[in-house]
């Protein structure tokens, strides 16, 4: 069988958001492109397509309408402090500075010009635990979720006047990079549908193949050492194609791979009842009013475990337990009001741009979603008493780990705090709920101090939650032109990296923590940067 050979000005390896944006930008500079993607055409756009669609923007029209005063200077201060970036993190700091200064035009305006719109209320993610994370709300939700984002860009691409200069090759797995005269000029691999070998040649190669979060073995090998051993069970919230294979290819070619232990995992993963790959997990948005307890039924902390303040703290706290999974204890009233799932699949109203339906679900809750998970997800149990709930929790795990006395006491103490009234609340979780409810974007979605064991709010619900992999924040080190750097800090001619493959810029733009919305934003920003750099040359 003859080998297929593709030629173009630029070869892009990976058809996720970063690769898609790079292709659009290259076409706008008159370059021909061969895009190589391992998945099928229905997955064009990658993980962004099933994401919630949040993008970090400073100085946006939505912020200004809400009276939110933001600036690149404030955002950079938040970014560096929250990510714990040191002076030694030269390229991550340079990329962070470039992003906060340019995201308003190079990300937000660029998207709006291509048919992407945003929900008018800005979400406030990652407020920070003991020190500020996002000092102000910056999480802009694409109207249509990540699916709407990708579909808008695909529509723009389909109508592009230079569209004929783009050739798409799906089901193609890249296994090697090729060099000619000390310059990277192509790649080689196999068509996984036909078994045919292929090669692709270009003046420049862009690696946009994602991170390592879809390879659970690689995640475990690079687990953050201070957390001890990784959990026995991890759920995969990424795609299997994000396997880190090209990271190793670049490393073996002399490229610098940095900070693979910087990962953005989530604490509230549950099993998907219709898995698309092994250990496919869904990332819940943990209800703020639920009690978060360990495998025994004991509250974790202090500080309190509450979503939207510090995601890394939630993961770390669970990973320091003897058994590294957790439970959230709540009731029907809390679940109806606060239960949500990250991603486009379970946010139908936003995804389908049904404003009235979304408004009604925000005001009155989403009981249909709660019923769907209770009926289908193996990690949900319900009961009409704490004793019955504990029995069902232990039946689910096949252990006697959850101690009825411990859980009953934790619930009793928490409910007693609420009964005293807000003036006498002395519980960190209640203080954080009060803080969240002061912002209008959270007030409508957060209960006003709801007791757990309330006879009027039953059934009780327990959700077993596992650590779920999502994004890897380290990766292939790059300069501000997205050129891959070798271990001596020098550019490797002809080779570029973007998006998650590059740690969203510089091999780790975020540091230890993300301010959220910086992943999709980073893909767009680096994809455009790489294309512009190549076009200049």
Image: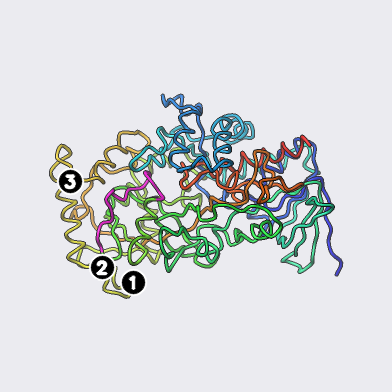
Q: Is residue 141 left or right of residue 441?
A: right
Give the side of residue 484 with respect to residue 125, left or right.
Answer: right
Main secondary structure type of the part rendered in magenta: loop
Q: Residues within 10 Å of mark 3 (few under 14, many from 20)?
A: many
Q: Secondary structure at mark 3?
A: helix
Residue 236 in percent (x, y) is at 50, 61
Label 2: element kind: loop
Q: Position of residue 164 (x, y in %)?
A: 80, 44
In this picture, is 154 found above or below 464? above
What stretch of residues is rendered in magenta?
297-312
Q: CA distance from mark 3 to mark 1?
A: 31 Å
Name above or below for residue 330 compared with residue 483: below
Give me the disc on residue 397: 1
Residue farthest toward the right in the current orientation of the protein: 2
| Mark 3 or 2, closer to the camera | 2
Q: Which residue position is annotated with label 2?
A: 402
The image quadrant where one finds the C terminus is: top right
Mark 2 or mark 1: which comes first in sequence?
Answer: 1
Q: CA distance from mark 3 to mark 2?
A: 24 Å
Q: Is residue 299 magenta?
A: yes
The numbered mark at residue 418 is 3
Count of residue discs: 3
| Residue drawn at point x = 17 percent, y = 42 percent | 425
Contact flag, marks 2 and 1 (Cβ < 8 Å) = yes
In the picture as drawn, the residue positioned furthest to the left comes out as: 420
Q: Nearer the viewer, residue 516 or 185?
A: 185
Location of the N terminus (image quadrant): bottom right
Q: Picture quarter containing residue 192?
A: bottom right
Q: Is residue 46 visible?
A: yes
């Amino acid at each position: 069988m003859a080998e297929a050979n593709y030629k173009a000005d630029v070869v892009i390896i990976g058809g996720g958001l970063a690769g898609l944006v790079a292709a659009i930008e290259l076409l706008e500079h008159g370059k021909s492109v061969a895009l190589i993607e391992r998945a099928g055409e229905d997955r064009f756009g990658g993980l962004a397509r099933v994401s919630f669609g949040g993008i970090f923007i400073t100085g946006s029209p939505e912020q200004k309408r809400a009276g939110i005063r933001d600036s690149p200077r404030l955002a950079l201060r938040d970014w560096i402090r929250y990510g714990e970036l040191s002076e030694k993190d030269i390229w991550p700091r340079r990329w962070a500075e470039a992003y906060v200064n340019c995201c308003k035009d190079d990300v937000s305006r660029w998207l709006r010009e291509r048919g992407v719109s945003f929900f008018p209320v800005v979400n406030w993610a990652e407020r920070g635990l003991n020190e500020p994370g996002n000092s102000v709300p910056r999480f802009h939700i694409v109207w249509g979720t990540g699916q709407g984002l990708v579909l808008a860009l695909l529509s723009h691409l389909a109508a592009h006047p230079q569209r004929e200069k783009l050739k798409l090759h799906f089901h193609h797995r890249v296994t090697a990079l090729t060099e000619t005269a000390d310059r990277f000029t192509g790649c080689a691999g196999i068509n996984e549908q036909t078994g045919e070998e292929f090669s692709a040649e270009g003046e420049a190669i862009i690696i946009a193949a994602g991170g390592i979060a879809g390879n659970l073995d690689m995640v475990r090998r690079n687990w953050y050492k201070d957390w001890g051993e990784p959990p026995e069970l991890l759920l995969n919230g990424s795609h299997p194609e994000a396997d880190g294979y090209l990271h190793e290819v670049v490393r073996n070619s002399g490229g610098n791979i940095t900070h693979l232990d910087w990962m953005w995992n989530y604490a509230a993963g549950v099993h998907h009842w219709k898995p698309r790959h092994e250990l496919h997990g869904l990332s819940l948005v943990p209800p703020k009013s639920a009690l978060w307890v360990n495998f025994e039924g004991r509250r974790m902390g202090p500080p309190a475990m509450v979503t939207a303040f510090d995601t890394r703290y939630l993961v770390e706290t669970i990973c320091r337990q003897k058994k590294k999974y957790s439970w959230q204890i709540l009731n029907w009233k809390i679940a109806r009001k606060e239960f949500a799932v990250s991603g486009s699949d379970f946010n139908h109203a936003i995804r389908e741009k049904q404003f009235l339906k979304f408004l009604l679900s925000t005001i009155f809750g989403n009981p249909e979603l709660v019923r769907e998970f209770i009926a289908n997800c193996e990690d949900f149990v319900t009961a009409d008493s704490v004793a019955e709930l504990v029995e069902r929790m232990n039946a689910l795990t096949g252990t006697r780990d959850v101690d009825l006395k411990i859980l009953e006491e934790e619930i009793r103490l928490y409910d007693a705090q609420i009964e005293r009234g807000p003036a006498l609340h002395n519980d960190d979780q209640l203080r954080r709920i009060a803080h969240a409810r002061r912002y209008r974007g959270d007030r409508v979605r957060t209960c006003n101090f709801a007791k757990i064991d309330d006879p009027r709010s039953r059934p009780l619900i327990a959700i077993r939650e596992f650590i779920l992999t999502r994004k890897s924040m380290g990766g292939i080190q790059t300069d501000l032109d997205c050129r891959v750097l070798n271990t001596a800090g020098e550019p490797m001619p002809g080779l570029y990296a973007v998006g998650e493959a590059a740690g969203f810029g510089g091999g780790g733009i975020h540091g230890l923590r993300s301010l959220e919305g910086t992943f999709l934003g980073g893909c767009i920003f680096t994809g455009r940067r790489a294309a512009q750099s190549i076009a200049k040359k």
